[in-house]
Image (cartoon, rainbow, N blue to C red):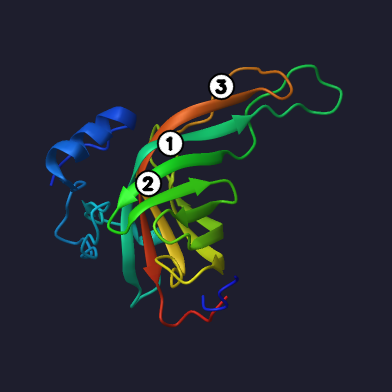
Amino acid sequence: MLNTRRSRVRVLGGAAMAAVVAGIGAVSYNASAAEVAAPAAVGADARAVSIPLIADAIKPPAKSKPIGAFFVTKGTQNYTCVVADGATTGAFTGKSTPEAQLLGTGGRIHHFGGPSWQSLRDNSLITAGSPVPSPRTGTIPELLLTVTSHTGAGLLAKADYINRLLTSGGVAPTGSCTAGQVVKVPYGAVYVFWDDPATAPV
């Protein structure tokens, strides 16, 4: 039913990150004195994740409060070959589609096309758009996204903004490709979900 309310550990990918989490139980990412305090991890399936320093260009609105911080345990940015009319080969110039598993203060989240995020604990679901980028050399940019829809009444029900931070990998392949070709590029990131009390329900 549609809800009308709306340290120091490197960012690692895949199995390596999972091994770190299994070994220490809590993960911090380049902690800064300027970072915002993340909510406490709640539940047996949760992990503590520190919120990294956020570039001014992609900070959520003032007085926003974090409702969860999560890192990618396994994920790819999936690119489909774009072929111009009349051409026989193309390039990976289109937008990517995410497919990732996240773990953090609220348990586990599935991140997929939309872009969408769904809590595996309570099935609350959000989609977002209007990305504001903050470039990072050699990787996909950090982002601030605005939540555009909510489903369910659980963990993500009050999310108004999402940050994608401390990105690694995920850059589109170079070179030519053929129509329909899809390449899945591994990536890492920290996602932070924010509740802005001043934002009208969506």
Which residue matches tag 1?
A: 75
Q: Looking at the picture, which amino acid does disc 1 mark?
A: Gly
Number of marks in the rendered image: 3
Q: What residue type is labelled 2?
A: Leu
Which is more foreground, mark 3 or mark 1?
A: 1
Residue that mark 2 sits on: 102
Q: Tell me: residue 189, above or below residue 105.
A: above
Q: Which of marks 3 and 1 is nearer the N terminus?
A: 1
Rendered location of residue 56, percent (x, y): 35, 61
Seen in the picture, residue 39 relative to 101 is either above or below; the reply is: below
Residues at marks 2 and 3, CA–CA distance in whole angstroms: 27 Å
Label 3 with label 1: CB-CB less than 8 Å: no
For disc 3, the marked residue is 174
Label 2 Cα neighbours within 10 Å, binned few <14 / some 14-19 / many ≥20:
many
Residue at left 54%, top 24%? 173
Q: Position of residue 151 (x, y in %)?
A: 55, 67
In the rendering, at what x and y percent does residue 183 appear? 57, 25
Q: Which amino acid does label 3 sit on?
A: Thr
Quadrant housing the N terminus = bottom right
Graded by Cα atoms within 10 Å as few (under 14), some (14 to 19) or many (20 or more), the crowding at tag 1 reads many
Q: Which of 85 and 162 is in front in this view?
A: 162
